[in-house]
Amino acid sequence: MRVLFCDQSLLRFGFCIVKIHRDHCEVIAYGLLQLNGKQHYIERLQQIQKWLAGMIGEYEIDEVVCEEIQFQRNVQTFRKLAVLQYVIEVTCHSHSICFGKPLQVHVWRTKGVRQILQLPNGNKQTLFQFLNSYLGSPLYFDTNQADALGLAIYWCYTNYESLPLHMQGAAQLLQKGEGIC
């Protein structure tokens, strides 16, 4: 079984792919899809849908798990994130794969990953610093990729607590949307 974890965004979309083996879970790739903020958000949604369909096929994804969208102070931002989540869910449906229950940030990061990794707190920067160090400071590693890995760590621990999660040796994929040099 292969699961794609998404820290979804219309600008910097972090992701992580985990393969579930009989005796362990393995991060096989993680990375970032960078999109052009000067393009209309509908164009970026289309690029994400195309990218996601490609990832599902190339990596034989069985399930997609996203971070739950949070209500934003800016209603337009919340609306765009809701539409993005809809696009992800529809893409899963059209490829006959599971769209897993979205994970709420206060559960997976603040309570879950903080305790699993024994971090001093559950904030975004602390998780980034820990994973950046653990992975050997990969070039271009950022908080979006760290959050996607954090989603995977929490989900694997919650669903496969007895299986170790291996992250060393995972490929880092940096992909650019249209109009990004």
Image: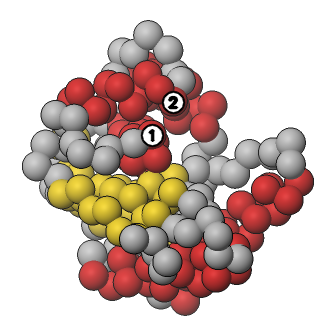
105 displayed left or right of 159 = right
Which element type, helix, strand or loop, lies under badge 1?
A: helix
**Spot occupied by residue 69 in the image (x, y as percentages of width and height):** 69, 51
> Residue at 47% of width from left, 26% of height from top?
125
Which element type, helix, strand or loop, lies under badge 2?
A: helix
> Residue at 59% of width from left, 84% of height from top?
46
> Residue at 31% of width from left, 62% of height from top?
174
68 displayed left or right of 111 = right
| Mark seen at residue 143 | 1
Could one spot residue 147 in this view of the protein? yes
Give the answer, above or below, for where 31 lies relative to 23. Answer: below
> Residue at 18% of width from left, 57% of height from top?
171
163 displayed left or right of 7 = left
**Spot occupied by residue 109 in the image (x, y as percentages of width and height):** 52, 31
Picture quadrant where residue 18 is located: bottom left
Marks 2 and 1, the one that precedes in the sequence: 2
